[in-house]
């Protein structure tokens, strides 16, 4: 429930509409405002999509007004959380901040107005696709006798790893830094406990009762997973066939329908995706046009990462040291101002003026990645970014921070062999600025960048693998491709599991509701 969730869900709404299904997107006003341009554009091109919104009960739930997304509430904290909550690895105090509880309360308060709105929809929807973190969706689905399909937003690799660790619990008795082999995978992949997502890390007894609420939410989400009719995943079979097949043994009704970002076909779609870009897209493309093909590093660490100023300076210095042209995306706010001051005073801006494009705020990421001048993606390995890098056929410089990002890094570096790690050893506290366990030094970042971008047989092979994967991604999403048909690779057996086909077989009204409540 963050931009990393509602962006692919709207891509999915477009994809379904491209298949001829009428889609109604229901979300909150703030998110609706971010999505309106995209939906208007889709509607103007003839796609049957509707956008409705429900007021988000911020004040009634005890939240600051207008804080209907997770990244916003974490920005808006006015009072720090109690010190006793400040030591939970990969959760951090903010995830246990009272606002987090209130946010959950607010989401629960949406159920009734959602159901009222739902009753007014004509024709009646035949299916609901919902973010699995909205804990009441299956209950609502039951009330309206409607199949609920959940969207998770992660790779099959992560889903399988998470499931296997939940079952085996092999990590629980280990120390934070002791490497262990992830159980039940077709490849031998080592991680440490400190790299695992927060949901796999039990909160200490001493932190109850605040943590109880978090655990209750976790339990409700797991119940949604169990009860849902099936699951759609933003991935494609050719990318991770053994992991997809592995997870399908656990979740039978699993549809890989990605890469969802490919539902954005023209430059306008790409430029508007997720938010209004902070840079004029033509100016951005013009700058890229002046660069040599395959030389530019695109550096963006997602929507939730909060790097310290020191860490940002290391990253900037690494980009400068690497001597390659770069596009560097920096989130707006206080930090950006301080960084800007450093760039001026240090002379960074002046020295890199010719070869650096800095985007402060929201970047048109997919548009940039698809430009031929871009040669590598320095990414935090959020699943959407990872897939977008794959679609663009780019090798990646991987810098995971938290959540599923270390799993995604392993997939890219160890399984697909299309990336090089900057060497992050441990997860950081989600949303926390001052909890970077270890500073990633400029030399380490530069080394990974050079490894990916400079000449050499190994590098050329890596680039070739990435290029081929990009082509396979596009083929998967095209008419007749694996995501389009959703057939199992290898056996070549058509499973008939394609969501759209299933709806058609139901012979009922073809309206789908995608619930996107967001963070
Ligand atoms: N994104 C973007 N512009 C930005 C930052 C992010 O378009 O300046 C998009 C990006 O393309 C991706 C999503 O936001 O689709 C971020 O999702 P991801 O899973 O990569 O990371 P998260 O932000 O959830 O950690």
Image (spheres, grey):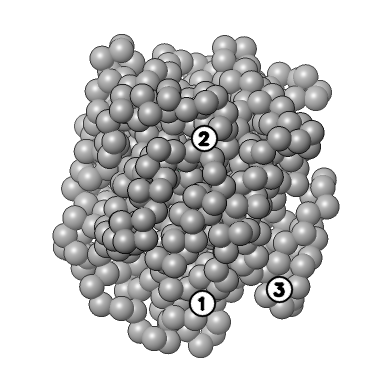
Q: CA distance from mark 1 to mark 2?
A: 38 Å
Residue at image location 66% in from the left, 26% down from the top: 467
Q: Would residue 65 be seen by someone viewing this image from the given angle?
A: yes
Q: Nearer the viewer, residue 326 or 45?
A: 326
- Residue identifier under label 1: 88
Q: Position of residue 418 (x, y in %)?
A: 69, 38
Q: Nearer the viewer, residue 248 or 276?
A: 276
Q: Mark 1 touching mark 3, by CB under 8 A?
A: no
- Give the image quarter of residue 459: top right
Residue at image location 62% in from the left, 17% down from the top: 475
Q: Few, some or many C-alpha atoms within 10 Å of disc 3 (few <14, some 14-19, many ≥20)?
A: few
Q: Is the CB atom of the residue marked by disc 2 within 8 angstroms of ligand 1's nearest atom? A: no
- Residue identifier under label 3: 177
Q: CA distance from mark 2 to mark 3?
A: 35 Å
- Tell us which disc is closer to us: 1 or 3: 3
Residue at image location 65% in from the left, 65% down from the top: 425
Q: Few, some or many C-alpha atoms within 10 Å of disc 2 (few <14, some 14-19, many ≥20)?
A: many
- Tell us which disc is closer to us: 1 or 2: 2
Q: Few, some or many C-alpha atoms within 10 Å of disc 1 (few <14, some 14-19, many ≥20)?
A: some
- Residue identifier under label 2: 296
Work out whether 38 lies above or below 184. above
């Amino acid at each position: 429930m963050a931009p990393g969730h509602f962006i692919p869900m709207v891509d999915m709404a477009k994809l379904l509409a491209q298949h001829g299904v009428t889609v109604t997107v229901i979300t909150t006003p703030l998110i609706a405002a971010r999505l309106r341009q995209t939906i208007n554009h889709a509607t103007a091109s003839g796609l049957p999509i509707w956008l409705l919104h429900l007021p988000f009960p911020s004040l009634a739930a005890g939240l600051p007004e207008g804080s209907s997304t997770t990244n916003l509430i974490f920005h808006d904290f006015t009072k720090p959380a109690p010190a006793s909550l400040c030591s939970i690895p990969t959760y951090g105090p903010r995830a246990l901040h009272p606002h987090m509880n209130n946010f959950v309360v607010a989401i629960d308060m949406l159920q009734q107005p959602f159901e009222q709105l739902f009753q007014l929809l004509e024709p009646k929807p035949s299916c609901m696709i919902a973010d699995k973190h909205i804990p009441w969706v299956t209950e609502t689905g039951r009330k309206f006798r409607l199949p609920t399909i959940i969207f998770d937003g992660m790779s099959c690799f992560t889903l399988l790893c998470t499931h296997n660790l939940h079952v085996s619990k092999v990590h629980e008795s280990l120390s934070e830094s002791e490497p262990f082999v992830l159980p039940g995978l077709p490849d031998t992949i080592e991680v440490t406990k400190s790299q695992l997502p927060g949901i796999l890390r039990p909160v200490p007894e001493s932190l109850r009762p605040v943590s109880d609420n978090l655990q209750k939410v976790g339990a409700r989400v797991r119940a949604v997973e169990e009860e849902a009719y099936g699951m759609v995943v933003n991935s494609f079979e050719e990318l991770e066939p053994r992991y997809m097949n592995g997870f399908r043994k656990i979740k039978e009704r699993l549809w890989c329908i990605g890469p969802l970002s490919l539902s954005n076909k023209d430059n306008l779609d790409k430029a508007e995706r997720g938010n209004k870009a902070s840079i004029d897209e033509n100016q951005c493309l013009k700058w890229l046009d002046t660069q040599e093909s395959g030389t530019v590093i695109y550096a963006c660490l997602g929507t939730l990462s909060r790097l310290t100023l020191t860490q940002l300076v290391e990253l900037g210095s690494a980009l400068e040291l690497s001597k390659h042209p770069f596009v560097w995306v920096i989130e707006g706010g206080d930090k950006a101002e301080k960084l800007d001051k450093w760039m001026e005073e240090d002379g960074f801006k002046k020295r890199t003026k010719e070869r650096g494009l800095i985007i402060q705020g929201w970047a048109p990421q997919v548009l940039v990645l698809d430009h031929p001048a871009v040669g590598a993606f320095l990414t935090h390995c959020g699943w959407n970014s990872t897939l977008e890098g794959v679609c663009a056929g780019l090798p990646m410089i991987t810098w995971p921070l938290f959540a599923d990002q270390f799993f995604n890094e392993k997939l890219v570096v160890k399984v697909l062999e299309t990336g090089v790690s900057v060497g992050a050893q441990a997860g950081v506290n989600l949303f926390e600025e001052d909890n970077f366990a270890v500073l990633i030094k400029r030399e380490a970042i530069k080394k990974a960048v050079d490894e990916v971008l400079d000449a050499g047989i190994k590098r050329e092979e890596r680039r070739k693998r990435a290029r081929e994967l990009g082509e396979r991604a596009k083929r998967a999403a095209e008419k007749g491709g694996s995501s389009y048909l959703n057939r199992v690779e290898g056996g070549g057996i058509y499973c008939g599991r394609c969501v759209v086909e299933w709806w058609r077989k139901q012979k009922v009204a073809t309206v789908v509701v995608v619930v996107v409540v967001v963070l």
